[in-house]
Amino acid sequence: MEEILLAHQKRYAEMEAIDYYKLIYQQTFGSYDDQINEKDSLEKLTEEYKGIDKTKTRVFHEPIGNGYVRVHLGAEKISETTLSLLNKFFIRSTNRRSGTIEQLEERLERAVELAEEEKLTVDAQDLAGVFQFYKERCYPPVSHSKVYHEQYDPHYRVLAASYLEYLPVLEYLVELAKGDTPKLIAIDGRCGSGKTTFAQVVKEVLDCNVFHMDDFFLPIEMKTEERLGEPGGNVHYERVLEEVIQPLMKRREVKLVPFDCSINDLDKLTVIPYKKFNVIEGVYSFHPALEEYYDVKIFVTTDPGTQIQRIKERGHEAKLHRFINEWIPLEEKYIENLRVNELADFVIHTGDKRMRAEK
């Protein structure tokens, strides 16, 4: 937190006590608007964008801590396509309320300490007084100070930083979807890397179907030594081709019958109406039997520490030994032997290092 406050103080030297409060509030809670809806939000965003003085140099985004960033609408990178995507990310980020009052108060107290230590240039008593004023009013969201508005003309939205890292890929997909030609997208990658999360974001941005490789587990009777010795053999890729890809190529509905691992048998039939834009998500989706059918291939990866932590967070700790000793080694064999990441048009990195997307 100290690093964030000092960075903002350096960039915005005229910050007043209320601006520190706003920064710490946003760092803790993100954005909040219990009446928000996508259409009205986009109209407001577009109107605000049109009125911005774009001759001023502005950074595209800056971190505010706790996984949030401020995205500046007047930045050179902003376009009409970007505005629409940013609005969707803003909607998803708003009202997450992941922080707590206790965390807010701890951060406010630390800010006062930094002011007392003269690491912050704002007067410590002024800062404490403003914080107490808003505490008595149950910590409401506030606007920037008049001085901040006059000096820096702020026009930004607070987003979860993770969404922002998807932006280059999503901009490409949005443009791709504007054509009349059907498109099939694959999202492959390591377990726990964020493939399903990214696929869900794509679904919210575009009118598309998302099919999951997890619905095509290999039945026990097919798990022979020979089959599992085949890179990518730990999935029923034949069914993916016959029941999903081939119908899509013919512009037909998909009759999806997921495999239920708990009973080692097929589940109920679900009919998925045909759509022009379709996504197949999951490890092994780049399998050689399937790879040639895709228009865009996206590989999502992460570091081993983040991978294990996410597996635990998803409630799979009881099966952790199987992930470590069985499923992850099979995935790594597939990725290494078939050089899967090199097949990708885009690679999205997540984890303990800064998320990034590469083309």
Image: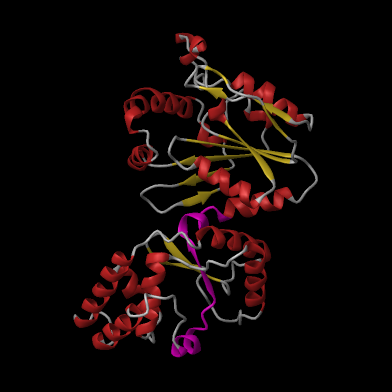
For the point 44% across and 86% down, the residue is 145
Task: Give residue 235's position: percent from left, percent from top.
Answer: 53, 22
Colour approach in the figure: secondary structure
The quadrant in which residue 245 appears is: top right
For the point 47% across and 43% down, the residue is 194
The quadrant in which residue 84 appears is: bottom right
- Rendered-image quadrant of the N terminus: bottom left
Q: With respect to residue 14, does 208 lie above or below?
A: above
The quadrant in which residue 248 appears is: top right
For the point 70% across and 53% down, the residue is 175
Q: With respect to residue 172, does 186 lie above or below?
A: above
- 239 lies left or right of 329: right
User: Between residues 99 and 70, which one lies in front from this camera angle?
Assistant: 99
Q: Is residue 238 among what the camera can see?
A: yes
Q: With respect to residue 145, does 298 lie above or below?
A: above
The magenta stretch is 146-167
Magenta-span inclusion, residue 233 = no
User: Between residues 341 and 269, which one lies in front from this camera angle?
Assistant: 269
